Amino acid sequence: MTHAYRGADIRIVPVSVSSPRTLREFCDFPKRLYRNCPYWVPWFDRGLQRIVERRHSFFEHSDGDCFLVQRSDAAARTVGRFALLEPRRFNQFRSKRDARFYFFDIENDPSASSAVFEFAAQWARRRGLTRLIGPQGFSGFTGAGILIHGFDRPAAMTMMNYTFPYYRDLLEAAGFSKYKDFYSAELIAAQFTPSVKQQRVMELVMKRNRFSVPQFRNKREFRAAALEIGRIYNQSWQDHEEFVPLTERELTELVDDLLLVTDPGLIKVMHRDPPRDTDGTPREPEVVGFILGFPDLTQALQRAGGRLNPLNLWRILRQKRRTRCFIINGVGILPEYRNQGGTTLLFSTLERSLRRRGVISAEMTQIAETTELMLAAMRDLGGRVYKTHRVYQRLL
């Protein structure tokens, strides 16, 4: 195999489907790195293989490669792994020239991390890119950043990852500076019980604005509404700096992933009933917002160890039915309805569904420090920020 980079002590090796050994090592290295860590959650090996094989929807419009970081000795011991991404569609949409790094897992080894970022800078410059940013993945729905606060709490499945405290030192020593923080907040069920006054406000909001939040009865009904959720996302997230519209295939993949880890009762879509036609005929309700809830499957995913077999699938499904802990990640409301009580209505409706499942706690994840609406909703629910992830950047 041709080495992508070779220094005095470190070599960086491309991961390829033509080399099963490198693919296996890309999956296995972080399992060794975090072997004794009770907070880390692995991706499924099949999902990583799909990315290396470039079958992920990201590669329809963008580019990227995966790499191993190894010692330049006879043992060729792996000390890290990472991916480099060129988000061409995002760059075009946002008029950026960014490169991203992702799947960044590494030992506490400054010489190894320096080699990674020297190579990453060269990789990006050859493509005419001017900023290296990360850890950041394929879309706004993939977890971003390294953990800088909350090291005594487990990751929220694979939505927001767990990293060791030394990652921050490695990045800042390599010349990276803060780009943006993302918060995770803990909601204790006993602390976000709606008051009688709040319930009356919800009823008034629904009546005044003709809002409703119907219950999905099965996956078929949810899938039928999925395209509307994608449309709302594409219209409501445009003020997020990380946003780029989802393609049809990306939306399909997102819906398939949602149906694997949640159930329709935890997906809430808000309708607004338009005025009747002049002859009194009612018109079809308009979808104006959504919120996504998930059973917390962290423990089952940890036990699976990245392997999806019948036993592990049974464990995941069992925890999905039994868990009393949940995750909230993904809210979208059309801009014209944000200040009309729609956000509070969505959270209140989801909260009622969680209570019917005997919720003990919930975690709101991936709240950007610049998102005042979500921060306000988190505070209204009595949420407490207990984890912070930071995305870094370096100009090239």
Image (spheres, rainbow, N blue to C red):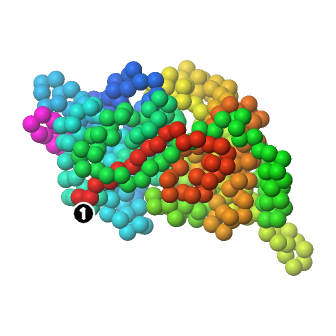
Give 94 or 228, whichever is nearer the viewer. Answer: 94
Crowding at label 1, few (<14), some or many (≥20) Cα neighbours within 10 Å?
few
* Image quadrant containing the C terminus: bottom left
> Would you say residue 102 sits in the magenta stretch?
no
Residue visible at 20% across and 47% down? 119
Return the x and y of residue 70 as percentages of the image width and height. 20, 32
Q: Is residue 71 above or below residue 172?
A: above
* Image quadrant containing the N terminus: top left
Q: Quadrant of residue 260?
A: top right
Q: Which residue is mark 1?
A: 128
Q: Is residue 292 left or right of residue 115?
A: right
Give 157 or 249, whichever is nearer the viewer. Answer: 157
Residue visible at 44% across and 50% down? 181
Q: Is residue 41 above or below residue 374?
A: above
Give 294 or 3, whichever is nearer the viewer. Answer: 294
Residue visible at 24% across and 50% down? 175
Q: Is residue 63 visible?
A: no
Return the x and y of residue 140 as percentages of the image width and height. 48, 53
Q: Which residues are magenta?
A: 1-12
Residue visible at 49% across and 39% down? 387
Q: Is residue 79 left or right of residue 274?
A: left
Amino acid on which the number 1 mark rests in the picture: Gly
